[in-house]
């Protein structure tokens, strides 16, 4: 690929919490989110004098699963090091992490490039490290600011996945992240729904200029937003003939902007050295024992072949483990019969409606959607009614109200498609034509929009129950009769 | 069997930082035995300060692994002993709470850094005590105070709960008036602990045996050379002569890597210490930082006032040695030097069973005699090789010079703690 | 030779503080000690410690945490279960 003059170049460092039961170096439970501050803490993760780390085997196994799934090479020997720096959330004033001997190197993630087609984003390395605690900023300028620390998060196992600077746009960065998330979820080592379970630092530059590190991105959407902001900022600087400084900037999620860090942070000298309280790892041979489940790419291909999904639908449906499982449950009773309709209705309509409500898929039972798809497939309701049924169905579940089936909703709201012969449609057509003489004139003078206008009027009168194809035929007939 | 002992000693040597007037105890091998514990070993509900102002008032919510083992065998923890702040010193003068005096001569230091433990035993206040040995901190005060002290093989005793100074070098170990006491205490504290993943499943179940016929003893020339007081050397040579009379033979040997042992030791311990001691910022324990200041400013304020000068000096030396551009010159080279030292010992131990020499190059210093840091560091030259190599080493009293005790040091192969105990025991039985 | 300025920088990196009065003495002692450390330049090898023990791991099992009061017991300043720390913003 030849990069353009002002090509954007992006590399990511992604930190993901591994979903182990206990912390990386102690037996404290990782299930801390619903409990009070400093309730999942022991001498080890509080950094009390004299406490020592003991490495969690499952965290290493999980990291190796990820490494295998992302095509990385496990190093013959890896070890933990101390990264020394002061910060109130860091209980020992050093983070136990991996430095010159990480668990894994190399590998890649395939994403759909902006130009279409698949593109490999190379990985530099994957290593394991501990999460620091959590800070809450308190006070104000007049009365003095201070911090409050909760060490519940301290010691939660993280993997850091470092990419090469292979992404060429903020959108690609987002795709990379989504793909990574999907892979980790498929591996069952990560729960993307837990707050703060993923954090991203991004390196971004415009070709030929210094690179800027953007820290503190904590959401999937944030990555694209932060980088888009940076691209604009950096391109503006270049346009004005200014030099881009090599610096670390912080992303302020609420405002969608990046802000220069303090100069002191940029002089960090972490004084890494091997952690003397832990023995090194030689785990390459464990790879043979790791059996990978079906991963997103394989599942996507299977959806295309098995269900006849379009590439785009298959990509969307398999892009999240939960969604893919949901889809397969919806069509389980009649795979070939239901999947063409179900893939459209789930990948396009359902996702849109859920996003609009900021609603989780967990609240919808697959059977409810199966019911809807069955009605659509049988021609009992029109697409338009289908949307209405879906909305009622989602609203009920969103509000935790009594959840009706699609069938029940159709009956209660009388949404069943009005049969072609029905007097109701004929009457509505009559009315529509009589109430809109101008449309009739326009139709006669050959204006194309007139027919569509009248279809709309009839639809309104029948509350969408008329089958569009049938309605078209009847309306054209009626107009022809009027002409005569 | 379980009960309580009253402990109310006349501590005229300032050996203790804290005492338990009523010390409970259980039953077991050490039922009712008064044991003093160096103040860098965490004791639940008993203040643990490392003789530093920065830990004044710190009450650990947990016991070090060895404390649990002591309690399980019925020992009575009667107090916490004075030390050089965080173990950084050879005299016990670097305590934030005043120096410990040598019971043999109160104008002299007890040695360090486990000076309080050694003085408490030497003065008869307790039968035995726990110390820790990073570069000689058990053997030096044992030598200076005329008692026995063992630095176990690295990994035989759990360090969990020992407030780390230099993780890769140090071990908790026993001090006692007799080798038998040292051996008994070692039997209680040794063994695997899942909380210390550098500890090994090598328990110590040994009763000292004085029969050393056929034993081959290496005598390294470096232990009797430059910097070693000739009177001290003579006392030790005489002691080795007694071992020969008991049926051992001596073999001259050399440890060429000794020339950089001290530098390797000080680079390693200051680097590790600079990181270990970074957590003392006053947030989770210790003196409160000014929370309205920015964190670096607040931490500097706490750490510059609550750490002693020697501690700050070592933190800075280690910080420097690990800083960008110097790792290869210092820390990496120090580890290479350790490998050479291990190799030297391995070579020598092919021909001999133990190595013997003085524990310290001199008798106990006078108070305030070692004011220059480098000259104090040089006094550790004979003890640090065992820590760098991880091998066991014991100091046993072997006579006097200028009226002050001299220690005979016996070093053994890795994990042959039993053998160095036997040799020390044989000597002790012979002279008593 | 390290300069007073370098020693000052190291003191800042270590957050131990150093005042004017100490700086001269510390720098002097530093240089004497570092000169002594120079003997390590003669050591061959890359500093890779020989190892014989690997993969010392524990099972992923939950053990009880400390009661919150024990976590907070030694903290000099606390608020609503949190530990109070200096400002970072």
Image (cartoon, helix red, strand yellow):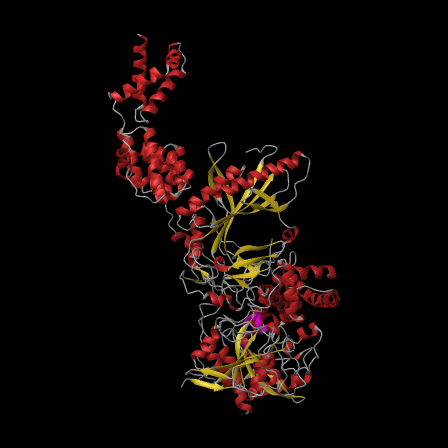
Between residue A16 and residue B24, name the one nearer to us: B24
**Is B299 included in the stretch rendered in magenta?**
no
Between residue C61 and residue A378, name the one nearer to us: A378
- Give percent across and percent down for residue B329: 65, 60
Q: Is residue A360 left or right of residue C23?
A: left
Over which residues does the magenta segment extend? B384-395
**The C terminus of chain B lies in quadrant:** bottom right
Q: Is residue A159 left or right of residue A231?
A: left
Between residue A197 and residue A395, name the one nearer to us: A395
Question: Above or below — where is B151 with respect to A150?
Answer: below
**Is B392 included in the stretch rendered in magenta?**
yes
Q: Is residue B167 left or right of residue A423?
A: right
- Give percent across and percent down for residue A2: 57, 33
**The N terminus of chain B lies in quadrant:** bottom left
- Give percent across and percent down for residue B131: 55, 77
Q: Is residue A21 left or right of residue B48?
A: left
Rendered image quadrant of residue A435: top left
Mark count:
0
Question: Above or below — where is B158 with respect to B10?
Answer: above
Furthest-front residue in view? A435
Rendered image quadrant of residue B107: bottom right
């Amino acid at each position: 690929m030849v990069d353009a003059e002002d090509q954007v170049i992006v590399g990511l460092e992604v930190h993901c919490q591994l979903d182990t039961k206990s912390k990386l170096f102690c037996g404290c439970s990782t299930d801390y989110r619903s409990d009070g501050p400093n309730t999942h803490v022991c001498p080890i993760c509080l950094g009390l004098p004299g406490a020592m780390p003991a490495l969690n085997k499952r965290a290493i196994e999980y990291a190796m699963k990820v490494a295998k799934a992302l095509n990385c090479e496990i190093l013959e020997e890896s070890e933990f090091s101390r990264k020394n720096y002061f910060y109130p959330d860091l209980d020992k004033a050093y983070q136990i992490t991996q430095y010159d001997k990480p668990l894994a190197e190399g590998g890649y993630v395939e994403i759909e490039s902006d130009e279409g087609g698949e593109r490999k984003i190379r990985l530099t390395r994957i290593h394991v490290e501990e999460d620091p605690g959590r800070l809450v900023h308190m006070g104000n300028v007049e009365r003095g600011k201070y911090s409050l620390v909760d060490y519940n998060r301290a010691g939660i196992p993280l993997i850091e996945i470092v990419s090469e600077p292979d992404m060429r746009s903020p959108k690609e960065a987002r795709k990379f992240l989504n793909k990574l998330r999907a892979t980790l979820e498929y591996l069952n080592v990560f729960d993307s729904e837990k707050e703060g379970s993923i954090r991203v630092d991004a390196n971004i530059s415009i070709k030929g200029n210094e690179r800027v590190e953007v820290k503190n991105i904590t959401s999937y959407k944030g990555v694209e937003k932060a980088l888009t902001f940076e691209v604009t900022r950096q391109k503006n600087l270049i346009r004005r003939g200014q030099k881009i400084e090599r610096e670390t900037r912080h992303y302020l999620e609420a405002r969608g902007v990046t802000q220069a860090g303090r100069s002191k942070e940029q002089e960090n000298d972490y004084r890494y050295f091997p952690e003397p309280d832990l023995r090194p790892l030689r785990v390459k041979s464990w790879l043979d024992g790791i059996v990978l489940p079906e991963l997103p790419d394989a599942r996507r291909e299977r959806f295309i072949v098995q269900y006849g999904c379009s590439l785009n639908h298959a990509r969307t449906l398999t892009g999240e483990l939960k969604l893919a499982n949901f889809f397969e449950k919806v069509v389980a009773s009649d795979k070939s019969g239901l999947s063409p309709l179900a893939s459209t209705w789930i990948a396009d309509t359902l996702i849109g409606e859920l996003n609009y409500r900021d609603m989780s898929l967990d609240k919808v039972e697959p059977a409810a959607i199966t019911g809807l798809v069955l009605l659509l497939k049988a021609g009992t309701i029109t697409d338009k009614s289908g949307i209405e049924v879906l909305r009622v169905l989602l609203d009920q579940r969103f509000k935790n109200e009594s959840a009706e089936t699609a069938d029940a909703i159709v009956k209660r709201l009388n949404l069943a498609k009005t049969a072609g012969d029905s007097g109701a449609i004929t009457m509505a057509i009559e009315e529509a034509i009589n109430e809109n003489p101008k449309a009739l004139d326009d139709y006669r003078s050959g204006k194309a929009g007139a027919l569509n206008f009248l279809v709309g009027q009839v639809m309104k009168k029948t509350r969408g129950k008329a089958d569009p194809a049938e309605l078209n035929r009847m309306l054209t007939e009626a107009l022809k009769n009027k002409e005569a | 069997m379980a009960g309580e002992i009253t402990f109310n000693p006349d501590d005229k040597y300032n050996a203790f930082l804290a005492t338990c007037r009523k010390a409970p105890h259980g039953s077991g091998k050490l039922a009712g035995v008064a044991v003093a514990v160096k103040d860098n070993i965490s004791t639940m509900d008993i203040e643990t300060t490392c003789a530093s102002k920065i830990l004044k008032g710190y009450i650990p919510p947990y016991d070090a692994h060895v404390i649990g083992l002591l309690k399980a065998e019925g020992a009575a923890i009667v107090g916490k002993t004075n030390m050089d702040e965080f173990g950084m010193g050879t005299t016990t003068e670097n305590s934030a709470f005043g120096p410990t005096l040598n019971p043999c001569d109160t104008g002299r230091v007890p040695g360090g850094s486990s000076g309080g433990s050694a003085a408490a035993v030497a003065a008869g206040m307790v039968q035995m005590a726990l110390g820790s040995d990073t570069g000689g901190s058990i053997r030096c005060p044992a030598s200076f105070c005329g008692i026995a002290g063992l630095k176990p093989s690295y990994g035989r005793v759990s360090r969990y709960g020992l407030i780390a100074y230099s993780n890769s070098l140090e071990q908790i170990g026993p001090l006692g008036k007799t080798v038998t006491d040292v051996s008994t205490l070692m039997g209680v504290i040794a063994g695997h602990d899942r909380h210390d993943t550098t500890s090994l499943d090598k328990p110590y179940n040994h009763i000292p045996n004085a029969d050393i016929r056929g034993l081959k003893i290496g005598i390294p020339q470096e232990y009797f050379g430059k910097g070693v007081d000739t009177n001290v050397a003579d006392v030790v040579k005489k002691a080795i002569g007694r071992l020969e009379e008991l049926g051992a033979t001596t073999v001259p040997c050399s440890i060429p890597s000794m020339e950089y042992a001290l530098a390797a030791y000080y680079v390693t311990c200051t680097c590790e210490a600079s990181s270990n001691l970074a957590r003392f910022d006053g947030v989770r324990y210790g003196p409160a930082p000014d929370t309205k200041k920015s964190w670096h400013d607040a931490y500097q304020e706490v750490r510059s006032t609550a750490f002693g000068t020697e501690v700050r000096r070592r933190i800075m030396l280690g910080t420097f040695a690990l800083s960008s551009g110097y790792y290869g010159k210092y820390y990496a080279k120090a580890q290479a030097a350790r490998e050479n030292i291990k190799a030297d010992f391995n070579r020598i131990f092919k021909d001999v069973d133990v190595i013997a020499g003085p524990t310290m190059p001199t008798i106990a210093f006078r108070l305030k005699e070692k004011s220059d840091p480098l000259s104090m560091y040089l006094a550790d030259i004979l003890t640090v090789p065992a820590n760098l190599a991880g091998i066991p080493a014991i100091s046993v009293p072997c006579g006097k010079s200028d009226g002050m005790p001299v220690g005979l040091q016996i070093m053994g192969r890795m994990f042959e703690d039993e053998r160095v105990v036997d040799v020390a025991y044989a000597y002790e039985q012979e002279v008593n | 030779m390290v300069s007073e300025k370098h020693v000052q920088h190291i003191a800042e990196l270590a957050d131990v503080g150093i005042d004017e009065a100490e700086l001269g003495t510390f720098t002097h002692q530093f240089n004497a000690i570092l000169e002594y450390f120079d003997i390590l330049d003669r050591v061959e090898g890359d500093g890779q410690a020989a190892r014989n023990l690997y993969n010392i791991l524990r099972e992923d099992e939950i053990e009880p945490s400390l009661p919150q009061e024990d976590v907070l017991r030694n903290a000099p300043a606390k608020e609503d279960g949190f530990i109070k720390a200096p400002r970072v913003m």
